[in-house]
Image (cartoon, rainbow, N blue to C red):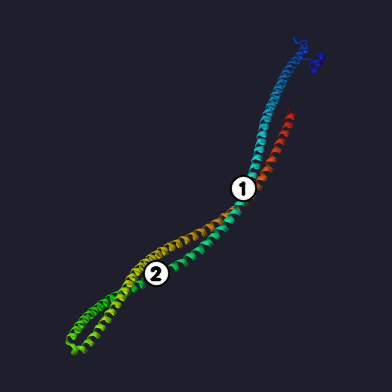
Amino acid sequence: MAETMTRLASGDLQTRLPALTRRDEIGSIARAIGVFHAKLVENRELVGEQQATRERSEAERRSAILQLADQLEDEIGRAARDLSSAADAMSETAGTVSHVVDETRSRAFTVAAASEQASINVRMVASAAEELTASLSEISAQVVRSTDIARHAASDVARTDETVRALEAAASRIGDVVGLIASIAGQTNLLALNATIEAARAGEAGRGFAVVAGEVKALAAQTAKATDEIRSQIDGVRDVAGRTVHGLAEIGATVREMDAIASSIAATVEQQRAATQEIAANVLEAAHGTEDVTQTITVVGQDAERAAGAAQDALGVARRVAGQSSELETIVGRFLAQVR
């Protein structure tokens, strides 16, 4: 029994148990040892099962850990690659943005300079438009004065025409009087001729009368000659008066045409003056708008400078992210190597 107990204590559960069938104390001890043996066998089986369960659990746990490690490696690697790709894309985009912002800033400054020059040019145009408006106002005033002068000239021509026509009428009346005088002179000459004839018939008694008749005849001849001269002068006056009336009519027509042209010019100049004033107002408004554009472009340039700084910061962040992504892959690799 002692040897059996020693073997059982050493873990030899294959040991046969003697005296199990005996009915004495040895048998009782043997049966008690049998119960102990059965418990040892059961305990060994339980320990074996627990060991197997523990080994299975350990294997499952290690398999799960390895699977998780593989999954972690895959996901972390994919995330790191995505992060690296995103960082590269971000870096490329930041570089592009930085280039675009630099170009935008350069163009903004160029536009600002051009806008400033345009503002100066517009103000020069506005000044020229104001000067043109002043000149047009002066021209309008001169045209108005010319119109007034033309109208006064037309009035003077009309009055002169009336005077010349009155002169022509007076010359006609004088011509009529001269005709009457010529007729009287003719009749006087005829009477003087008859008196001379009668004096000749009277002989010595009619000699004195003949002398008087001769003088009357001579006077009638002088009167006829004078009336012919007067008639010639009157005809000349009438001819000159007629030409003067015709010339005055042409002058009057010309003056009226000048008046109409001056009035048309005055209206046109007034329209141009109004249009020039409107242009000047629009140009001034455009100048203000150009100044606003210049200010806006200046702000855009300043914003572009700030954006360029932000793009450079983003580029630096992207590079740091790319570096951290590589470092993360390295750290995860070391961790997974330790886990495996």
Q: Which residue is mark 1?
A: 104
- Can residue 300 be seen in the rendering of this structure? no
The type of residue carrying mark 2 is: Ala
Marks 1 and 2 in Cβ contact (< 8 Å):
no
Q: Which residue is mark 2?
A: 150
In percent of width and height, residue 89 lies at: 65, 38
- Can residue 236 be seen in the rendering of this structure? yes
Side of 291 relative to 145 (left or right): right
Task: Decide which of 59, 267 is in the foreground and name it.
Answer: 267
Residue at position x 69%, y 39% in the image: 321
In percent of width and height, residue 37 lies at: 75, 16
Query: For the view shown, which residue lies furthest in the front direction?
Result: 203
Residue 237 found in image quarter: bottom left
Disc on res. 191? none
Side of 306 relative to 327 (left or right): left
Q: Residues within 10 Å of mark 1 (few under 14, many from 20)?
A: some
Task: Decide which of 300, 247 is in the foreground and name it.
Answer: 247
Q: Quadrant of the N terminus?
A: top right
Q: Residues within 10 Å of mark 2 (few under 14, many from 20)?
A: many
In percent of width and height, residue 141 lies at: 45, 68
Residue at position x 53%, y 59% in the image: 125
Q: CA distance from mark 1 to mark 2?
A: 65 Å
The type of residue carrying mark 1 is: Thr
Q: Quadrant of the C terminus?
A: top right
Task: Decide which of 119, 332 is in the foreground and name it.
Answer: 119
From what the image shows, is residue 335 above or below residue 205? above
Looking at the image, tell me whether mark 1 or mark 2 is earlier in sequence order: 1
